[in-house]
Amino acid sequence: MSIYNVQTLPVEFSEWVRKQVSEANIEVIPLKGAEDKNQAVPVGATVAITCSPKFGLERTIDHVAAAVSKGYRVAPHLAARMVESDQMLRGFVHRIVDLAVTDLHVVGGDADQPLGKFFDAEADAGP
């Protein structure tokens, strides 16, 4: 929706903003204190947990588990360049499935060089 169409909304602007935010995808970088900041995310929003080359997949999984335990819909990022092996990829997928996560963002990632054979999201898709 264009900002120019806001004047023609069938509801009050503040109500419209609350609805948009409550249904938004909120991206969270898994840094120290991020779990506390998740408390500001409205119920109903999807929390997308990024994958940092500094902290790796394990930190992403930790934050995914914390967000799931608080009742959020979660969509973790799987950074292809952070995956060292097929076994690591399978382990990541099994862990998010065990957490009942049904969405996944597969990205190349920010690392300059891949830790394994995966360089981009297409390489993760496999045959």
Image (cartoon, grey):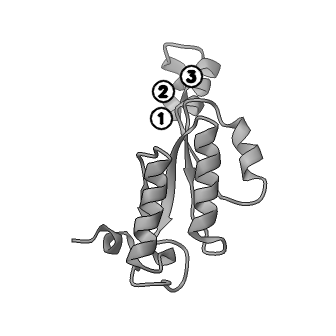
Q: Three-letter amino acid code at disc 3?
A: Trp
Q: Which residue is mark 3?
A: 16
Q: Three-letter amino acid code at disc 2?
A: Asn
Task: Report the residue at 78% width, 53% height from top.
Answer: 33
- Asked if 122 appears above or below 38 in the picture, the reply is below
Earlier sequence position, callout 2 versus callout 3: 2
Residue 5 circle label: 2
Q: Position of residue 69 (x, y in %)?
A: 62, 40
Element type where label 2 sits in the image? helix
- Asked if 31 appears above or below 127 in the picture, the reply is above
Quarter of the image with the C terminus in it: bottom left
Task: Report the residue at 47% width, 75% height from top.
Answer: 83
Callouts 1 and 2 close, C-beta under 8 Å:
yes
Element type where label 1 sits in the image? loop
Q: CA distance from mark 1 to mark 3?
A: 13 Å
Element type where label 3 sits in the image? helix
Residue 14 circle label: none
- Asked if 23 appears above or below 9 in the picture, the reply is below
Task: Report the residue at 60% width, 29% height from top.
Answer: 43
Mark 1 or 3, closer to the camera: 3
Q: Is residue 102 left or right of residue 125?
A: right
Task: Report the residue at 40% width, 67% height from top.
Answer: 90
Residue 2 circle label: 1
